[in-house]
Amino acid sequence: MPTRSILRVAVPAPLYTCFDYLPPEGVDPTTLPYGIRLRVPFGRGERIGVLVEKVATSSFKKDSLKPATAALDREPLLTSEDLKLLLWAAAYYQHPPGEVIAAALPVRLRKGEKPVKPEIAGWQLTSAGKTAQPTHAPQQLKIIQTLTEQPEGISQQVLYALCGNCRPVLRTLEKKGWVEPCEIKPQHILTTPDKTKLTLNAAQIDAISAVSTRMPGFNAFLLNGITGSGKTEVYLRLIEEAVAANRQVLVLVPEIALTPQLMQRFQCRINSPIALLHSGLSDREREKAWLAASQGEASVILGTRSAIFTPAPRLGLIIIDEEHDLSFKQQDGFRYSARDLAIVRAQRQGFPILLGSATPSLESLHNAATRRYKNLELPERAGDAKPPKIDLLDIRSAPLNGGLSPALLKLLEKELAAGNQVLLFLNRRGYAPVITCYHCGWLSECPRCDARMTLHLGTNLLWCHHCGHQRRTHRHCPECNSEDLHPLGQGTERLEEVLSQRFPDQPIARIDRDSTRRKGALEKILDEIHSGHYRILLGTQMLAKGHHFPDVTLVGILDVDQGLFGADYRAAERMAQLVEQVAGRAGRANKPGRVLIQTRHPDHPLLQTLVHQGYNAFAQVCLDERRDAQLPPFSYQALLRAESPSAEKSIRFLEDAAEQAKTFNAAGVEFWGPVPAPMERRAGRLRAHLLIQANHRSILHKLLSQWIPALSKLKSSRSVRWSIDVDPQEML
């Protein structure tokens, strides 16, 4: 039997193949395990690849193969199961395998650097601190008491979870010589769990039992629970069971904003190491957490989209929170869905997966209806909380003040006078979405996109939220030189200004991407909201999901009409999910809640169904429409995008691509287009789309597997940038 002495390496390059190399000189190929990194010659330089296979023969002559320069690891960074999943994902999403596997590694490791030590930054008491008794400083005393219970030291993340964001107090104690920084080993990152648990209702008990009795073994569950129904408590009980059985748990959330509160709850309940993975961490912090998970030292992995690729040798359960969220789909480069890959990973490795949401995606509801998923319902709010009362507020003839109707302002005054908190939702950051000249009609349009530039008053910038282009605001109209320039419309900055003038004595918390840009800013604002410092909460969709604000009794949703008439067929679904999620922030404790939705289309049938019959009825109407139109989830799609400085070149490439596809077996596949993209010009390039649809997934993917690798051979492909998006979630 021939010796398998040829190394097949996944090299990060825009090519749909792996590459063959000989072993490094003097190295026995049998000593090289799959999943290690290799430094290999590539083109005129070198790259870092990952060994995925060893073969006896190559399509190239053996004497033409180059040897790898060096093996960088003794032990594999990725297991064979990890590699199989990544190669499957590369094939399914039609992306080069080397780029897919590289994306699964931490940044430093994909550059060929040595792994860092997995110790995590922490704090411990000094000798002097063990006898210190600070007076008139309760926060200092709390920190010292917490550190006293952890003689090995405590990680900074855990300390912040138990004592709040206490960085300034820690620095004060460090100056006194009472505490000092230290490095904590992952197995020592433990807390003293809170043994008090909430009382479960019957639906929660049934949901926990349904999942736990199926462990181990693959099953997909949809936890369809209204906002405030206690889904997080269900997660915690299942995590506790899995950890007690020596299994790891992967918990995915859609946004960084949701990780601090979940981390705090997990650390107060789970006496086991937790690895946190999201893009807000430094490269070294992420790598340490990744290594702790991959070496089995962290029992719980909490992260955003990219955490789906984290190796976990004892993985026994995956939980997807807010499974409907668009953030789980990568929108550039390797365009994967973390939710869908999580289901594939659970199925391939044989353990359960739980998808949780108050507003499940239509795909998940369809899978539950066809019994691919087991449907678990939480129809009531936990404890004594009741769902809020939701009303539509017709603003067609109402005089608006900063986007606020008189009726909404009157209710704001009433709730604030009663000492309650109010939340206002406007999914548009900045001061105003456009500036205009009253003299000649000029508008602040982006020079690189078919979009208007948003005024950000705090930085005095006009900013395109699509391509990132920025410029200073004009003092004079660029067209007629008039000074008669005025902002039109409302953003969160302008709404904050209006509220400050109307309620000068009330502190206002504004939560959007601008106000939370600094590290730790979001956690600080949330802590002050929970302490009662802020009575008015204002923000974008960062406020909409998952947050528990027990004192919020009134929610005002200022503008939902765009979702009723969007160009994307998913616009209404996204609108309904956002409305339900925002509305769910009201009345989550003993105080009753109320929600007002301002609209100029109060009679719209979808809005009427959502408000009066609920999200599930709304979703059923949308599913019926999708079935009639044969749109997903009743069909399967891929979107071929092309862009270039010339609209003609983008269209020509897509026309050539469609003709080329017909030379393969394209029976049962429909081609829609090519057409200009809904936003044709973006970042100075003209974009066009070709939509490919089939009623059977296998037919679509059989065509894609032959067609996509061949597209680069088209002459017209040389003058465009193109990409393929399998199971697209946005058509923009």
Image (cartoon, rainbow, N blue to C red):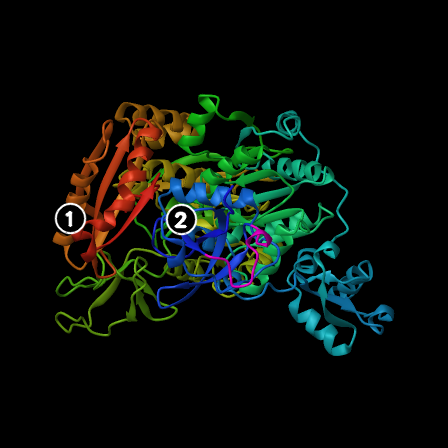
Q: Residues within 10 Å of mark 2 (few under 14, many from 20)?
A: some
Disc 1 secondary structure class: helix
In depth, the one of 567 and 87 nearer the eye is: 87
In depth, the one of 602 and 573 nearer the eye is: 573
In the figure, is residue 139 to the left or right of 576? right
Q: Is residue 184 above or below residue 333?
A: below
Return the residue found at the far front: 1
> Which residue carries the number 1 mark?
651
26 inside magenta stretch: yes
Type of amino acid at the residue the image marks with label 1:
Ile
In depth, the one of 217 and 29 nearer the eye is: 29
* Location of residue 292 by image quarter: bottom right
| Residue pictured at 59% horizontal, 49% vertical | 302
How far apart are the two marked residues, 2 and 1, measured between alpha carbons?
39 Å
Where's residue 130, x and y in %? 85, 68
Span colored in magenta: 22-33
Q: Is residue 373 above or below residue 194?
A: above
Q: Is residue 626 above or below residue 29?
A: above
Q: Is residue 617 above or below residue 647?
A: above
The answer to whether residue 614 is visible is no
Type of amino acid at the residue the image marks with label 2:
Ser
Disc 2 secondary structure class: loop
Where's residue 296, x and y in %? 67, 49
The answer to whether residue 216 is visible is yes
> Which residue carries the number 2 mark?
58
172 inside magenta stretch: no
Q: Are marks 2 and 1 in contact (CB under 8 Å)?
A: no
In the figure, is residue 480 to the left or right of 254? left
